[in-house]
Every structure is written in structure tokens, then in C-alpha cells.
Amino acid sequence: MEQEIILHRKREHLYSILDIETTGGKYNEEGITEIAIYKFNGHKIVDQFISLINPERPIQDFVAKLTGINNQMLRNAPKFYEVAKRIVEITENTIIVAHNATFDYRILKTEFDRLGYNYNKNSLCTVELSRELIPNQPSYSLGKLCKALGIPMSDRHRANGDALATVQLFKLLLEKDTVKNILQESVKYYDKREEKDKLNKILDTLPEDRGVFYMHDTNGKVVYIGKGKNIKAEVNKVFLKDTKRSLKIKDRISKISFENTGNILITRLKYYLELDELKPKYNFKKRLKINLEPFKHDNFIIYLKGRIPEENSIILVENNSVFGYGFTNLSFQENQIEILKPNLTPIHNQQLAKTIIRNYLKTNTPEKIVRF
């Protein structure tokens, strides 16, 4: 029996439910003015820490009006380094929980960074959990959500009042997670292991072939288009980058689709034509210098390597316009234009397509060109 109790305790999570008030100001330049932390074992509060903090920088006027905390009140309050040890102790071996946890955790980590201390915690956001477990609410702000749920609030926009309300909200969310996996799946790990798992699963679905790839958000919208001779390697390059743009892409993508192209020219055509049509959010705006000169011949077919050995890729130019492109392994299609046409993807942006083809032909030789 004693062994069973010990095992149960090992499975029990501890949470640091907190709220932080700040000075306001520029991103990552804010200072903490008040903090409230309630250590919660899933059933009851087992420890707490509440304190005003001297941020050693002025409070923005609008923040002072919102919270009621002013510079005078904080003159004799402890500075962050004086309470840092207590914060480390109370949050040790716990998951940080807050309403908009990204903000509170960032502020707390920034203060520790200033002290040269590496403060890493896994976190849960009660805004995200509420959207999942209490859907269709008109607002998920702490005040309006608590009012709608009948959770009492006092000292709104003060750390202690907001933290206590978050404790009650979190209790409700624990009860509503009847299958007991939503909270676990919602934990944001400081080492980003859930993101790494997601990206590795996506990479496993991709080929090592030449082509164009499309990164989709959770709504299916294409937010980034890329290309290369090895789709998997090109996607991995995006995942390995640490720029703001790459971080946003990794955070938002849900899946990647792709199309094999077989050769450089079809790759360039698909890439630039679809960039122009889809205008994905995270691509740089690439503009080709348009060349308006006509082709030397009005009617011809460009034959290139296909996606597999027995296949050709074809680009049809008719009446000095790029009709379309496609793939075929049937010689009768290639030799009869009217049978070939329905198998081609039509091209609408003639100026862009002609420029891409003309630029390619200046430095490359296709397998053959047939004029008719």
C-alpha cells in the first residue's frame, strides 16, 4: 500500500501559478513591479510568495493608472535580485502557469538573464487551455472569462488578485480535462522538444528529390514556398535557421506539401509563378527583371528531363506565348499538339514565364527543342 502511494506522488505535477505586473515600455526592457506566485499541487495551494518589486526604472503612466502601482510605492520595495532566490525555490520542479504565459515567463526569464542566471521552466497558458476546454466564449481575457464562469475576482490588474483568479480558473480547467491528456499535450517545454518532434515528423514525410515545397498553417493556407534539388534538405535548412522569420514559420506551420519537378526550368517556373499567385506571408518579395522581347520562334516545344527516367517534361510555346507545361511518357501525346494541350498546366502570367524561360535558355541547353 505504501508503495502505491509513493508511485502516485511521483505522477503528481506541481504548478507555479503566477501573475506579474510590469513597468511597461519597450519589448524586453520592462521591469517587474509586482509578482504573486501560488504553488499548487493540483488540489490545493501549498506555498505562496507575493511582493512588490523595485524595478529600478520608471513606470509608464498608463500602466500606473491601470494597476494603481506608482513609482513612490516601489521606492522601498526589494529589488529583483533580493527576491530571486525565493522565486527559484518556490518554482523549483514546477510547471509555470499563467494567463498569457508567454508574456509572464518571458518577463521572468528576462530578469534572471540580467542576473546571469539560466532560468528555464516548462509552461502552461490558461488562455490556450481555456480556448480548448471552454470553447465559444466571447472573450478570453482574464476578467471577462472569470465573470462569465462565475469566478470571483478582487484587486483586478494587481498580481495577487489576478494570480488567485488564475488558480481558480486552472482548477476548473483540470476538472474539464476529463481525458487527462489535453494539459499534458499543451505544456510548452523550454527545450522546445514538442516543436522538434513536430518538425522531425514533417521531415520524415519529404523526399530527397528536386522540386517545390509549400508550408501550410493550421488553416491550410500556404505561408511559405521553397525550392531546391533536394526538398528534404531545403526544408531542413529553413528549420535550422534562427532568424525571426524562420522562428515564425516553424511556430505556425502544420504540414508541408510538395511537387517533384525533375529539372531546373520547371522548378523555376512553378516557384516564381506560384509566388506571384499565392503571395505567401513569409517569403521575401522576389522580383525578376521582366524581359519583354519576343521569342525568336513563335511555335516550339521544349523537352526536358522528367521526374522519373521514362518521363519527359514539356513546355509548349504557341504564337509566341507560353501555353503551359507538364509531364508525359507517351510519344503520341508529344507528337500531337491537340492531344498534348489538355495535359498541360496553363500559364497566365506570360511576362514572368517568358522571362524565366528566356533566362534559362541563355545559359542552359534543354534535351531538345522542336519547332513546328
Image: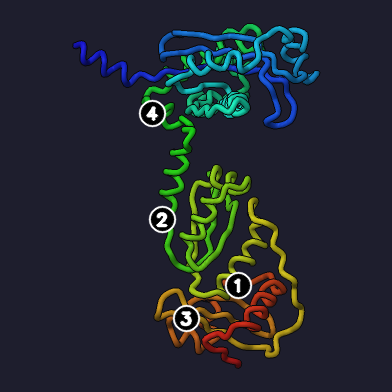
- Residues 357 and 3: in front is 3
Q: Give the spatial CA distance, label 2 vs label 4.
A: 26 Å
Q: Are marks 3 and 2 in contact (CB under 8 Å)?
A: no
**Mark drawn on residue 312:** 3
Of labels 1 and 3, earlier in sequence is 3
Residue at horizontal 62 percent and vertical 24 percent from the top? 111
Pointer 1 local density, CA inside 10 Å: few below 14, some 14–19, many at least 20: some
Q: Nearer the viewer, mark 3 or mark 2?
A: 2
Task: Judge from the rendering whether residue 311 lies leftward or rightward of residue 348; answer left or right.
Answer: left
What amino acid is found at the position of numbered circle 2 in the picture?
Thr
Of labels 1 and 4, earlier in sequence is 4
**Mark drawn on residue 205:** 2
Pinpoint residue 39: horizontal percent, then vertical percent: 47, 13
Pointer 3 local density, CA inside 10 Å: few below 14, some 14–19, many at least 20: many
Secondary structure under tag 3 reads strand
Pinpoint residue 156: horizontal percent, then vertical percent: 66, 11
The residue lying furthest to the bottom in this view is 372
Pinpoint residue 228: horizontal percent, then vertical percent: 53, 66
Q: Is residue 218 above or below residue 92?
A: below
What amino acid is found at the position of numbered circle 4 in the picture?
Asn
**Mark drawn on residue 346:** 1
What amino acid is found at the position of numbered circle 1 in the picture?
Pro
